[in-house]
Every structure is written in structure tokens, then in C-alpha cells.
Image (tube, helix red, strand yellow):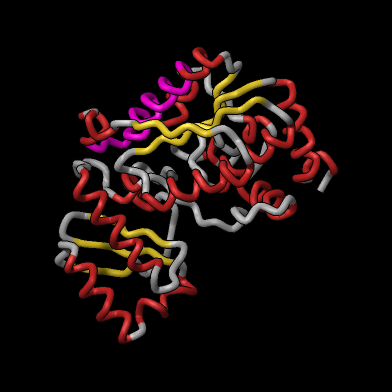
Amino acid sequence: MSNEEKPEKKFSDLLELLRGAGSAVLAFSGGVDSSFLLKALKTAGTRTLAVTAVSETLPARDRERAVAFAELLGMEQRIIRTEALKNEAFANNPPERCFYCKDELFGKLTAMALDGHYRFVFDGTNSDDLRDYRPGRKAAEHHGVRSPLAECNFSKADIRAMSREIGLDTWDRPSSPCLSSRFPYGRRINGPALRRVEKAEEFLEGLGLLELRVRDDGSTARIEVREEDMHILLNEDNRHLIARELKSLGYKFVSLDLEGYMSGSLNRVLDGRGE
């Protein structure tokens, strides 16, 4: 590995980029990527406003983590409300669903940047994301949003490695995309369905499962966990407990995906494209 490829060199390049930016509004979800970028912005001394968008598609625990992390760093933060479910184009859940959500978000952030005299709007997109199917990138490009991590060629592995090196406890946090990603394309998304998925995943997390998804197909909850965690679900006591709990939420069938957890698994219907 050349010196230019090392995460430490990329981090130095990132700090230089952020210092040159001067000021920015950051789309801050509190996940691994945006938390790392917020820490880098603080280290660089860049005037920053961290904005966390709250909606029915965001798990409550994610908002709590975002607020706690920004407070820990002493960064200015603002919570805003987005209303993706009021947009029929989003609620009908087409493959380009994410575009409509991000279009609303980035429209609001660019207006906030203009009002607050911030030079840029940043998001936490990394270099791996650029190779995935992510309609939200079109919204970012439309609004002129910059992605410093991708610009400095930070992969997810790089971000986790550097987060650990600089002492961030977010370094091993599982990915947590919005709850809308649990529904197959074409199945309409609504508030009660989102809350049902959130409650199901919170219950499973309580059993010690951290990296998981509950894919909601109306009558069926299809659980995805890492292969090494499947024994937790298949334990006789847990198996009956899980079935009873998820059925109490309204599911008629509860299944386990034997291939294990896979980010973007519902995108298999899109000609093999990834999330």
C-alpha cells in the first residue's frame, strides 16, 4: 500500500480540504460517516452547522445518537423536520424513492446555508457509495452538495479505521439506513408500517442482535442477521418468543433469510444493482 493510499494520508488531505472550505452546513445523521466528518470539521476549525433531519423514516434511537454526539463535540446543531411521506412520489416507493427524500432535505439545507452565510453543504457520502445504486446522489448533484469523504477517496473501511484511531466510539456502529429501506419497491410506505418495523427491530436488538434488518412484505417479516448470529434466532426459546412478539405487531408470518444480512437486499430486483 502506498503512502497516498493510507487512511492517515487521506485524513490529512481531508483536513486540508475542510480548512479551505471555511464554513459548511453538514447533513448529519449521526451514523459512522457523518460523525467522522463532523469530528474532522471540528478538528479543521471549519465553521459548521450540523443539521439532523427528523421524520417518520428515522428511528428514534438514531436521532438520540446524533444529538448526543454533536453535544459531545460541542458543535452547533439544528433539528429540522422533513415530510417525505407527504410526497406521493416517495410514499408510493418507486426504485428512485431516495431521490425525493434527499431532494427535500438538500433543498432545505442549501436555503439554510444561504441564510447563515455558509459556503457549502456537505454530506457523508463515501467512495463506496459512489459504486452503489443511490438515487439520492442525483439530488445531491442537483443542489450542489459536496461529499468531502468521497472527494478524498475514503472508503467505509477507511472511515471505520480512522474513527477508531482518533477515538470515536462510532467506529463499529452498524449502518442504519432509513426505515423506508425495509419495504420492497412498489409497496406503499406509511407511518404505521414504519413504526411496526422500528418496534420489531428494537425488540430483536434487545436480544443482542446489532446488525439486522426486518424486511416488511405486508403479512411477512423477513429477518436478516449475520450468519454468526443466526443461532440466537434459532434458539428454541428465542424462536418462539420472536414469532410471538412480531405476530403481536401484526405480521402473520415470521421468516429468517438463510443467506444472512445483506445491505440493499431488496435491490436484487433491480437487475442486480446494489443499494
Q: Is residue 259 above or below residue 177?
A: below
Place residue 231 in its image quadrant: bottom left
Q: Is residue 263 left or right of residue 188?
A: right
Residue at (21% x, 50% y) in the render: 193
Residue 176 inside the magenta-drawn segment: no
Q: Is residue 242 left or right of residue 45?
A: left
Q: In the rendering, at what x and y percent does residue 243 appear?
A: 23, 74
Q: Is residue 46 left or right of residue 186?
A: right
Furthest-bottom residue in this view: 236
Q: Which residues are magenta?
A: 92-111
Q: Is residue 31 above or below residue 126?
A: below
Q: Main secondary structure of the magenta part?
A: helix
Q: Is residue 222 above or below residue 44?
A: below
* Quarter of the figure with the C terminus: top left
Q: In the rendering, at what x and y percent does residue 215 appear?
A: 30, 56
Q: Nearer the viewer, residue 175 or 119?
A: 119
Q: Nearer the viewer, residue 251 or 49?
A: 49
Place residue 74 in its image quadrant: top right
Q: Nearer the viewer, residue 72 or 15?
A: 72
Q: Is residue 211 left or right of residue 60?
A: right
Place residue 80 in its image quadrant: top left
